[in-house]
Image: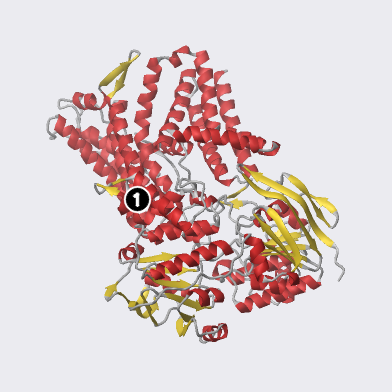
Amino acid sequence: MEENKNHDTIDQDNKADEQESPAPQPRQLRGLYKNVNISVRALDIIIFTCIAVIVLVVIIDLL
Amino acid sequence: MANDVLLKMEGISKSFPGVKALDNVSLEVKGGTVHALMGENGAGKSTLMKCLFGIYAKDSGHIYLEGQEVDFKSSKEALDNGVAMVHQELNQALKRNVMDNIWLGRYPKIAGIAVNETKMKKDTEAIFKQLEINVDVHRIMSTMPVSQRQMVEIAKAVSYNSKVIVFDEPTSSLTEEEVEHLFKIINMLRDKGVGIIYISHKMAEIKRISDEITIMRDGQWVATEPADNLEMNDIIRLMVGRELTNQFPPKTNKPGKVSLKVENLSGQYNQLKDVSFEAREGEVLGIAGLDCSGRTETLESIFGVRTRKSGTITLDGKRCLNRSAGESIKNGFALLTEERRSTGIFGVLSVKENTVISSLDRHKHFGVYLSEKSQREDTQHYIDAMHTKTPSIETKIRSLSGGNQQKVIIGRWLLTDPEVLLLDEPTRGIDVGAKYEIYQLILELANNGKTVLMVSSEMPELLGVCDRIIVMSGGRVAGEVDAKNTTQEEIMALAAKYV
Amino acid sequence: MNNPIKKINQTCADYRHMNAKGRRTFWIDGILNNMLYIIMAVFVIYTASVRPAFLTLGSFANLITQVAAYLPMALGIGGCIVLTGTDLSAGRVAGLTAAVSAVLLQEADFANKMFNNFPKVTGWWILLSMLIVVIIGAFVGFVNGFFVAKFSLHPFIVTLSTQLITYGTILWFFGLNGNNGQPISGLSKQYKEVVGGELFRLGNVAVPRYVLYAVIIVALMWFIWNKTSFGKNMFALGSNMDAARVSGVNVFWTTIMVHTLAGLMYGYAGFVEGVRSGSVAASTGLNAECDAIAACVIGGVSFVGGTGSIGGIILGVFVLRIIFVALTMLGVDSSSLYIIKGAIILCACALDMRKYLVKK
């Protein structure tokens, strides 16, 4: 079977390549994040929550 | 046949930093017709579609679906509104089965919670029956060949009862038989009143299947004509902006003595059986065959990235064990892989780094220190020689178009000074202009006495560039033909010999 | 040094071409991608205003001392991350090598000396001891790399096992010769002098010798990462393993060497650690890899693989240290520091993912 290897990791890199087609959301990443399926929105939420936690902890501690 | 305009894209413009990707482009697709969208890489076809599906936000212009203005923010929104796409990229969940892939995101549910497997199976089988697709719905995607996966992708688009379906390079991985099947499906859709946008580089197909053709160039609309009004030469001229008198460069290479001898090659974990052939210096040897016939496996086995059960490889009288890529490179072999995206390029690295990676020893001072200057010189040399379009040698390779990426990888291999070049589908997914340049490169290599093996699924390419062609079938060599004296039919007959 | 200037000019030109939406994305992405630097700046400014002592030369000396201490481990682990892996054994390896160095280099007449038959501590003996522990570290790294390369096991699993095995070894070691798990102290004066002796003074605070050693190590790692074929192979391998294999990169040996080199770094980190904290306990090095990994991710060594720079790692360590020095100065509870550290790591990973996900 002329199977193309390594289709598990779908490369979602930004390209001006004409062959690339619109990908359905959410997207997949490579490397350690290989099996993570997450949207930009979810990441933004995580980021802001972390920052909020940091700020809150510091403020509470200093009071 | 009075067909209403289903989809109208009007005055679409889109710019990226430094580049105007779309400049006031318009496209009208009538229901029950196939509208082909053609253009070289970088012409803007993909960008236009991305604006339609909301992947990119257009800077200006309007899109109307059945007369109503729409502005999709995502593929899902487009899908829900009846605009679907069959991707070339096959973004599928490979570890799941066929049914899961088709109904991803809209599983039929029992009481809104549990997935209704029976209904899913019934619906899937119904669609497959309608489209005459013969695939077991329970099969895991990764176990199926690319062509069948593409069929699933098509079924998925159809299952959304879309009014407009976009096919992006749908036949790049299909055999002739499957292409016929696809055309049957497209005709079925056409009769149902679906508006189809067909993006492809394959002229013959376009002429066969489309009703209208729109050509783009450099982000601008160039022409829209009924397919019957345009000849292949007209299309090429409009796409490229200049006359391309011939599709293939003149062949001036003269094959000399036998350089490469492959004897009784059998695969340990694949279907190769007793593959034997010879190739000569200064020759371009084509390898033809159907999708699963073992062409890629042959090249990979010669290069040492596939395990051999038995067989010998001899180059210029010297026996080569080629147990690994590194050893093969030292023996003078080079392999241009079939899928440059997954096994060829290092996406996050620069053009320079992609070029020098296989020949780092050339730049070593004192055996350790890599000279920046010589790396730059080597890279620049091949960029100039092959007219590779890139903003700079430090640009990340992933921002280059497919044809230019391929040139960078060819440059990588040329720097290893190989005797034998194993090319697996070297012009796949590359536009007409770049294809011609790559043919020129291949013929120049042959002219310089190199031995070139070329796997290709495009008959015209094989007949136009190669000297001899071996045809593989079912993992064996079915026959050998002379490119000048053979026909497509003869090759097809051989390809079917051991199927 | 044309590149930064060219880049700025290019960015300005691009910005002028952008429409409203493009500009909004530009600012949002810009802020988010540099979020941790912004947090650092906020902390710095706030702490400086509340505790002026923060901005003194002495405080800066303290900062670079800390950076020099945390840097070697981050440099080692950086390689593993470039290969899309990780290394959870780093901390314990450093703990082991710290213990071994301490034992080899205790003061000759120390009451609770572990072993009595080591030669008197001289310059050569110190050097030899360092080599011994560095080899120990490299050995553990080699084992990690071997299992990853040979059996295609994920580095997470392999290094998790080595972490536990190493910890077991540490505990066993601390029980030798009737020591019964007591911390090892009484380190030889010479050892302390060679590693931690004063290099120079900055505003009344002594900067130790290991800052100089750290600079040497940075130069060495920079050379390896950027000027050797090993370094190029490492990045290619991390970027795309299949393409690397086909291109002739020896995937097996490159993987092993990356982990071995990392282990070597942990070994060195352990050698310095004993002197830094005065004594070595079984818990030395616990969770040290967290700081190292966080520093790498903040510094641009993405888990996506194939990217990263030595400068970035230094910056990452720096940012992390500044934040914690500032927080400590503010009097933040040490338990809260753990919470904050965790949040920072999660934030850094999410930002990293976002960078490689955003496309519009």
Q: Left of C55 or right of it: where is B196? A: right
Please report the residue visible at 63 percent of the width from the left and 57 percent of the height from the top: A21
Toward the viewer: C324 or B37? B37
Query: What amino acid is labelled 1 in the image?
Result: Asn
Residue beneath the point at 42% across and 14% down: C56
- Seen in the image, is C12 located left or right of residue C230? right
Q: Residues within 10 Å of mark 1 (few under 14, many from 20)?
A: many
Is B391 rendered above or below residue B340?
A: above
Q: Is residue B89 above or below residue C23?
A: below
Numbered circles on residues, count: 1
Q: Quadrant of residue B100?
A: bottom right
Q: Secondary structure at mark 1?
A: helix
Residue C179 picture quarter: top left
Q: Is residue C262 visible?
A: no
Viewport quadrant of the N terminus of chain B: bottom right
Closer to the camera, B270 or B37?
B37
Name the residue located 20 percent from the left edge and 31 percent from the top edge.
C105
- Name the residue nearer the viewer: B138 or C358: C358
Judged from this view, the residue extending furthest toward the right is B2
Residue B215 place in picture, x, y as percent: 69, 61
Q: Which residue is mark 1?
A: C144
Q: Position of residue B218 (x, y in %)?
A: 64, 53
Residue B169 seen anywhere in this rendered image of the structure:
yes
Chain of the residue on which disc 1 is drawn:
C
Q: Position of residue B335 (x, y in %)?
A: 41, 66
Residue C66: image location, x then y, percent: 37, 26
Res B278 → quadrant: bottom left
Q: Is residue C65 above or below residue B417?
A: above
Of residues B483 and B296, the one drawn nearer to the viewer in this rendering:
B483
Horizontal arrangement in the rendering, residue C150 relative to residue B349 (left or right) = left
